Image: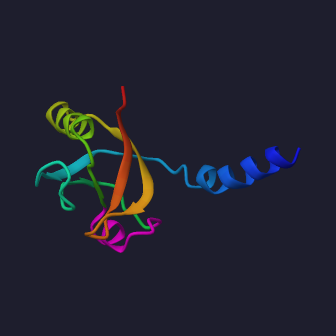
Amino acid sequence: MYRFIVVFALLMPSLSLAVTYDSKIKQLQVEGVGDAYNTVHLTLDITGSPCSSTNDADRFAIVNNAQQSAAIAAVMVDKTIKIMPTGNCNSGNIEEINFIMLKP
């Protein structure tokens, strides 16, 4: 029972951070995968991020090639995306993306 409580207590904060955003992409800033300013700017007003630069510019940091490809595809076909951020701020104080999903 003690182990269950400890595991649940450790997982509880991460469960509360499972915020997602559904939006169209306003613009992409492509600096290269791994660059702090390789970002996707949304048409949605972001206010709840722990990273001030995400809140100020409504953007999230792309962290890998799969996310970059999904973002480019969404722009090309004008699709709405779902983004789940990680809660981590990069060196540019921009929240990193956990996943990008193209919506039907």
Near-viewer residue (76 or 50): 50
Which residue is pictured at 31% across the width and 70% down the height? 93
Rendering coords of residue 3 (x, y %): 80, 46
Which residue is pictured at 27% across the width and 48% down the height? 63
Near-viewer residue (62 or 7): 7
Kindly give the residue lying farthest to the front in the view shown: 3
Rendering coords of residue 15 (x, y %): 62, 49
Near-viewer residue (30 or 90): 90
Rendering coords of residue 20 (x, y %): 47, 47
Rendering coords of residue 44 (x, y %): 35, 56
Q: Which residues are magenta?
A: 48-58
Image: 54 above or below 12: below
The picture quadrant where one finds residue 51 is bottom left
Near-viewer residue (39 or 89): 89
Q: Quadrant of the N terminus?
A: top right
Q: Quadrant of the C terminus?
A: top left
Report if residue 62 lies within the magenta region: no
Report if residue 50 lies within the magenta region: yes
Q: Is residue 46 left or right of residue 92?
A: right
Which residue is pictured at 55% across the width and 49% down the height? 18
